[in-house]
Amino acid sequence: MSLLDPLDDISSALVGLVPEVEVEIRGEWTTTHRRTYEREAQTGSGLGPFVDIEDMRWRAKIECSTPLTGIAFLRTAREICWVKAGRPVERPLVEVSLHVRANYVDGRATFSSNLMGSVLPGIPVAFSGNVETSCKLGHSRFMTGRAQVVATAGEGAFVVILLPRTVIKMGRNNLWHLRDEFAASLPDHVRPVLTRGRTGALQAHEQDAG
């Protein structure tokens, strides 16, 4: 038996099903500052101690000739969390961020990401003091229907699979699924993430080596 990478597997299953439309991500880094409670238990108390936080955000628009939606993935050493974006829109937004204590006193940051406002869990990562070396951005141009790394930080990777409006159908509560005529051709182990649910987690699966 061998282990398949779930994201490569989804990409392979979509080849020939999803139209390949070129997309381009254009964004820039900004930094803002805020003061917050040192511990979550203090929330709402109005009492210190407080800490100063720098929020370093890379916000980008996704340029494409057709409205898009998609699935965002957070790959870590243990699992791959996923969340679906909402209904297809023109020029959807994508964001990654590092949240660090002012003066980088502990050499750590929280790496966060979202696609069209659908947020993935934040994870702790090392921070060198330079946002562009601590959070490395992926290629700016790629195709719909392919797993594309948007950014990596530490052992975390933010990956998206973008889908054109023509291949999805909207359901209730802004939850979409791949149209039946496309989903019918998917392998059983790939179909659920593209046809059911809003969030979930993926594990590597086994296939026969021969």
Image (tube, rainbow, N blue to C red):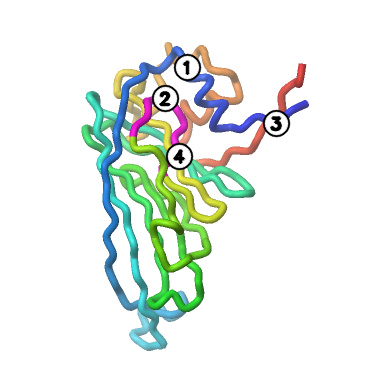
Residue 194 within the segment the image draws in magenta: no
Q: Inspect the image, locate mark 1, and give the three-letter code of the amino acid beneath it.
A: Val
User: Label 1 belongs to which residue?
Assistant: 15
174 lies above or below 121 = above
Q: Earlier in the sequence, mark 3 or mark 1?
A: 3
User: Label 4 belongs to which residue?
Assistant: 149
Alpha carbon separation for disc pair 3 and 4: 20 Å
Q: Inspect the image, locate mark 3, and give the three-letter code of the amino acid beneath it.
A: Leu
Residue 47 lies, in percent from the top left, at 37, 88
Q: Evaluate whether residue 9 shows in this view.
A: yes
The answer to whether marks 2 and 1 mark residues whose Cβ atoms lie closer than 8 Å is yes
Q: Inspect the image, locate mark 2, and give the three-letter code of the amino acid beneath it.
A: Gly
Q: What stretch of residues is rendered in magenta? A: 141-150
User: Label 2 belongs to which residue?
Assistant: 145
User: Label 3 belongs to which residue?
Assistant: 3
Mark 1 vs mark 4: in front: 4
- Quarter of the image with the N terminus in it: top right
Residue at 75 percent of width and 20 percent of height: 208
Q: Which of marks 1 and 4 is nearer the N terminus?
A: 1
The answer to whether marks 3 and 1 mark residues whose Cβ atoms lie closer than 8 Å is no
109 relative position to 5: left or right: left
Q: Earlier in the sequence, mark 2 or mark 3?
A: 3
Residue at 52 percent of width and 19 percent of height: 13
